[in-house]
Image: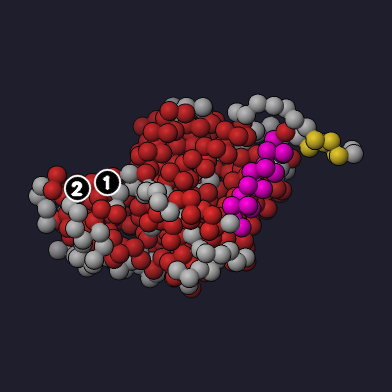
Amino acid sequence: MGIYFFTAAISSWLIWLEERIDNKNKNLKRFIIFLAILVPSLVAGMRSNQMGTDVRTYVEPLQYFANSNDNFNSYINYNGTLYNGQLFSRFEKGYVTLIYLCSRLDKGLFLTFFISEFIIVSMTIFGLIKFNKKVHISICLGFFIFLTFFYNLSFNLVRQCIAMFILLYAFNFLIRKEWIKYLIAVVIAMLFHISAIFAGLLILLIYYFLYNSEGKTKLKMGDLTIQNEELKIFWIVLVGVIVLLLPSLIKSIFSSSIFSSYLNYIPDSINLSMLQIAIKLPFLIIILLEWNNMKDNPLRYFYLSIAIIDILLSQFSGQSSSASASQYGARISWYTSVFYIYSVPSALMTDKNKNKRILLTIFLVLFLIAYWYIFTVVLNYNETFPYVFASNLLN
């Protein structure tokens, strides 16, 4: 547990320090950012191949196959199976290309692990920095959410996490209305995990509906006036609930598409998951508590919409005749969960009541530490505890 504590403490402190250095010292700020990215990336790179469930499922088999191929064309166009029986063609071209390039320099897993994590952490930190230029937030708090909520996850869901954090960074294009750049980023994310198209389009549709559709409709109910944006949130949530209640419809619609292999993540029926609600509810509570303080931040409607959709999507962890659906259904919601990295620090930063802001921040930090301890140490989700160094590091 010590190495995780060291990683979180050092990296968070570096980002905290970077935020307090004058912008005139650009080279120093860049060096500190590099160190903040390097530390967690090195820890990820030096881990054993026994850490992370999906490592033995596809990372290691792909690495072994890449090691044995000297011709990239024959490698990338291979139609056979890996040593564990999985079809090579089911893995996205971007990720298998990354592994092939790493295998040219390192036959072990260190470089593959390191580069994968370097991409993930870079997208997180640079995404926070870019977002901060548009909406004032605590970059340090956002990064701490990553370290406690997503860092260990990235040891397991390697491909999906690369895609997730590319999309998180790409959200900066949306808020600047750089639509083409956003769509290009979605395509790049798809090269690492095809499910990114679902998340990318979902985020685009929600954002466009909230901020680009015409009309200033207001609904009056007695003395209560419901604003246009609040009506839009209602419609977004209503559609989300309908989709949640009809998972079989989703399966039938996409059964003959390129996404058919990922439909096993969707259960046959939805059962209320109180665990998932308990995990996501603290974030939603903070957004609601700071709602009035965010009145000058138009993104508050997106924050609330995505938080509610995240809770709805997390219910895909319900029961199914397919074991993989029950076990992995909640993976879908990770694409929406990453936005807490932006939304929660943004919400807290708007609170002018210093005591309230400090209390909520302490509550959040304690919750995140408790979450990390329970799910990483006690339950060992993602199989990343205890930390084990790779046996061939010194060879």
**Would you say the residues marked 1 and 2 are in contact, meaning their CB atoms lie under 8 Å apart?**
yes
Question: Residue drawn at (54%, 57%), measured in percent from left and top?
Answer: 247
**Rendered view: 394 above or below 69:** below
Residue kind at label 2, given as amino acid type: Ile
Please tell me which residue is depicted at 69% across the width and 32% down the height of the picture. Answer: 296
- Regarding residue 349, the answer to whether it shows in the image is no
Q: Residue at x 47, y 31 (%)?
A: 173
Q: Nearer the viewer, residue 274 or 248?
A: 248
Give the magenta part as a residue range.
229-245
Report whether 38 appears left or right of 301. left
Please state which of residues 177 and 281 is positioned toward the viewer in this rendering.
177
Q: Which mark is residue 209?
A: none
CA–CA distance in space, label 1 to label 2: 7 Å
Place of residue 371 in the rendered image (x, y in percent of width and height, measured from the top left): 54, 63
Which residue is painted at 57% across and 33% down in the image? 208
Callout 1 amino acid: Lys
Look at the numbered disc 1 and give the secondary structure of its residue: helix
Label 2: few (<14), some (14–19) or many (≥20) C-alpha neighbours in 10 Å: some
- The residue identified by callout 1 is 93
Is 291 drawn above or below residue 144 in the view shown?
above
